Image: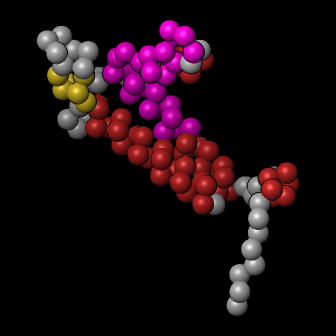
Amino acid sequence: TILGIHLIFLGVASLLLVSKAMFFGGLYDTWAPGGGDVRLVANPTLNPGAIFNYVLKSPFGGDGWIVSVNNLEDLVGGHVWIGLMCIVGGVFHIVTKPFAWARRGFVWSERKK
């Protein structure tokens, strides 16, 4: 249950960043012409191929892995995906009990009365 609650909080926080970027003031865009500017992100990238391609890049060499995000649309779109996945995972962990292989790994302590 505690894992589920924390995942939901992280998902909500991620979606709060998305709402700030899209509706409440925008984000600072370092790639904007003239050295950067604060702007609203009107169309975040929601294409899973574009978003998860960053995660599938090699972290070694010159690919840059997730650090290679170079526009705010991809950054905000990634936070949409992460927020939704955290909330779905949080609900899953709240409504299910741990699998047997995971329960065996936990250290359970009895509550003293």
In the picture provided, is 90 more to the left or to the right than 22? right
The structure residue drawn at horizontal position 29% and vertical position 31%, both measured from the top left corner, is 22
Q: How is the image coloured?
A: secondary structure
The structure residue drawn at horizontal position 52% and vertical position 50%, both measured from the top left corner, is 8
The structure residue drawn at horizontal position 35% and vertical position 17%, both measured from the top left corner, is 71
Residue placed most toward the observer, 64 or 56: 64
Q: Is residue 51 magenta?
A: no
Residue 96 location in percent, x, y? 73, 55
Q: Is residue 69 magenta?
A: yes
Q: How many marks?
A: 0
* 23 relative to 67, above or below: below
Magenta residues (range): 60-85
Q: Quadrant of residue 18?
A: top left
Q: Quadrant of the N terminus?
A: bottom right
Q: Quadrant of residue 76?
A: top left
The structure residue drawn at horizontal position 18% and vertical position 26%, both measured from the top left corner, is 38
Q: Quadrant of the C terminus?
A: bottom right
* 7 relative to 83, above or below: below
In the orientation shown, which residue stands out farthest toward the bottom?
Answer: 113
Residue 11 location in percent, x, y? 48, 44
In the picture provided, is 2 more to the left or to the right than 31? right
Q: Give the main secondary structure, helix, strand or loop, of the magenta stretch.
A: helix
* 38 relative to 88, above or below: above
Asked if one can make out residue 42 in the rendered structure from this viewpoint, the answer is: yes
Residue 83 location in percent, x, y? 48, 39
Asked if one can make out residue 45 in the rendered structure from this viewpoint, the answer is: no
* 105 relative to 76, above or below: below
In the picture provided, is 44 more to the left or to the right than 95? left
